[in-house]
Each structure stands twice: as structure tokens, then as C-alpha cells.
Amino acid sequence: MIINVPSMTNPDKSYEVDTIKLTCTCPAFRIRNRGQGLCKHIIKALEDCETKFNLNNLIEFIKEDNDALHFINKFGEETLHHLKTTGEVFENKGRIVIL
């Protein structure tokens, strides 16, 4: 999932963070870290995702309504993709199954 994270020193600038690949477009990540390790923008994006998409809340939603389209409309396709990629759920014939 790609998230725009505002610069912490320049409010007019933001960086793109990929929360699945753990990459960032900021200079600290690209140049100083040489694409390794986590910069402060990646950490912020992961914290924001955890708050917004608490795994327990997502699982409870799926238990009540396992229709994939309803889930996507509420939480976004990226969230479902992330859950499938991390092995939390799988999708079969438009239904989400918790693993």
C-alpha cells in the first residue's frame, strides 16, 4: 500500500512510502540508508496503518460480513491485498476466509 507521508521538516513536501515493500522516496532512505533499514517516514506510515487498520477490527468485520466487495468498499483494495500477502486471509469466489 502506498501512503503519502508529510515531511517532518517541510510542510509543503511529502514522500511516498510503500508499506508492503518498506521503501520510501525520501533522501534518507534512498541515499543515506542506500535502500536498507527504516526511515522515520516508513515508521510513521506503519504506525498510521496500525491505528487505522487494527487487525482485530478487520477480522471482526470479516467475521460479520465476509463479502470481499463490502470489505473493499470499507477498507480499500490495498488493505485486502495486504492481508492476503501476509497470510491472514484468502479470497475465494468473492468471499474472504480467515486463516
Image (cartoon, helix red, strand yellow):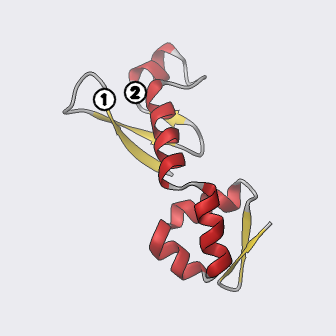
Which one is in front, 21 or 48? 48
Question: Please, is residue 80 above or below residue 41 in the view?
Answer: below
Give the CA separation, mark 1 to mark 2: 9 Å
Q: Residues within 10 Å of mark 1 (few under 14, many from 20)?
A: some
Within-10-Å neighbours for mark 2: few <14, some 14–19, many 20+ = some
| Mark linked to residue 60 | none
Which residue is drawn at the image coordinates 66% and 66% (left, top)? 59
Residue 26: image quadrant is top left
Residue 71 image position (x, y, % from top left): 54, 74
Dot 2: what SS? loop
Residue farthest top in this picture: 32
The residue under label 2 is 26
Count of numbered circles in the view: 2
State the residue at coordinates (47%, 53%). Answer: 52
Would residue 82 be found to the left or right of residue 31 on screen? right
Q: Amino acid at mark 2?
A: Cys
Contact check, label 1 and label 2, Cβ < 8 Å: yes
Q: Is residue 77 above or below residue 64?
A: above
Q: Position of residue 99 (x, y in %)?
A: 80, 66
Where does label 1 land, which residue? 7
Task: Report the residue that reaches farthest toward the right.
Answer: 99
